Amino acid sequence: MSSPLIKFSISPDLAGLRLDKVLAALDEIGSRTRAQTLIENNKVKLGEQFPKSSHMVKEGELFIIELPEPQTNHLEPLDLPLDILFEDEDLIVINKPAGLVVHPAVGHEKDTLVNALLHHTKDLSMKFGEDRPGIVHRLDKDTSGILVVAKNDFTHEALSKQFQERKVHRIYWAVSYGLAAKPQMKFQSYIARHPTERKKMASVKDKHGRVLTDPQANPLIGKWAVTHAWKVHVKNNMSLYRLKLETGRTHQIRVHMSEAGLPIVGDILYGSSKKMKLIPSPEIRATIENLERFLLHAAELGFVHPRKNQNLSFKAPWPEKEMALLKDWGFLLELLNTPEEPASEKDEDVV
């Protein structure tokens, strides 16, 4: 079996960064250490050359990355501690740490949440196939926070229906670069694969280059996505946001915030590195440079228990490391728990 190849071209947002840092942002690689190992083993090519980890990438450069051969499809249990917020015979609610991939994929066959779940329990739904048992919805690898896992097909189908009908309560917290003019915003667009940068998602645009914000537009590609955002606190040219999802599309919050000129701190793939110059403190810039994740956290999840018909609601604070970091930067995290949400959509600035 031949090893899978990834072709990755450098967008303007990534130009000027170290190669190992850029590759670490790819889901298939996922860490700077793994990126450095691939580079040192001559698994990353630029033309006919094998660049070093310290290579400063340039716009338009095309890298070909050879990943190790994928492992067998047989899922192996992984003895990994899980932060379980709730569990019964039907479902498990987990507080996922940043850095943990949800289900197996190329580059992450044995070290995912699914592998840890298989070690924890034999009861997992097979609704969506054997490679992602129990998984009702996902969080990106670098997003921390709450997700729900189904133990049987009945629960999986019922929870999936709640997500599809937008009946699930989902609140995220994020730290972004920039200072939005409006305290309340509503982002709406169709999200699809980026037309030229295949590792990214993007809002679909019309023939004039304008983002389609009409829910009735019905373009040939893309899924309708709506995100509500409330600016909670501003410090050091960064903004702390509380975000509410109506829909749950791939990279939805990351896309909407980036396209609004408010990329999430640490999100290299969506242009945050170019905004670092906005930070006046060299100490904070150095800390951000060494972040191993972007600052997005799934803080609240609420739904109806499929079998018991009870309303369940869960909250999880920022992980301790990030909480200490944000407090050190001067953010008032207690404000996140008392948001002044608009009484109606008229109070929101549609972006």
Image: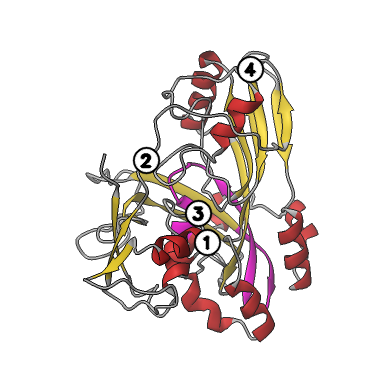
Q: Is residue 183 above or below residue 97?
A: below
Residue type marked 4 = Asp
Q: Which is in the foreground here, disc 1 or disc 3?
A: 1
Residue 285 placement (x, y as % from top left): 62, 79
Which residue is label 2 attached to? 70
Q: Is residue 143 above or below residue 153?
A: below
Query: Which range of residues does the magenta coloring cover?
Result: 230-256
Which residue is label 1 attached to? 33
Which residue is label 3 attached to? 253
Q: From the viewer's perspective, tell me whether residue 276 is left or right of residue 54.
A: right
Q: Is residue 243 above or below residue 159?
A: below
Residue type marked 1 = Thr
Secondary-structure class at tag 3: helix
Badge 1, how many Cα within 10 Å: few under 14, some, many 20+?
few
Of the numbered discs 2 and 4, the one sitting upstream in the chain is 2
Residue appearing at x 72%, y 53% in the figure: 319
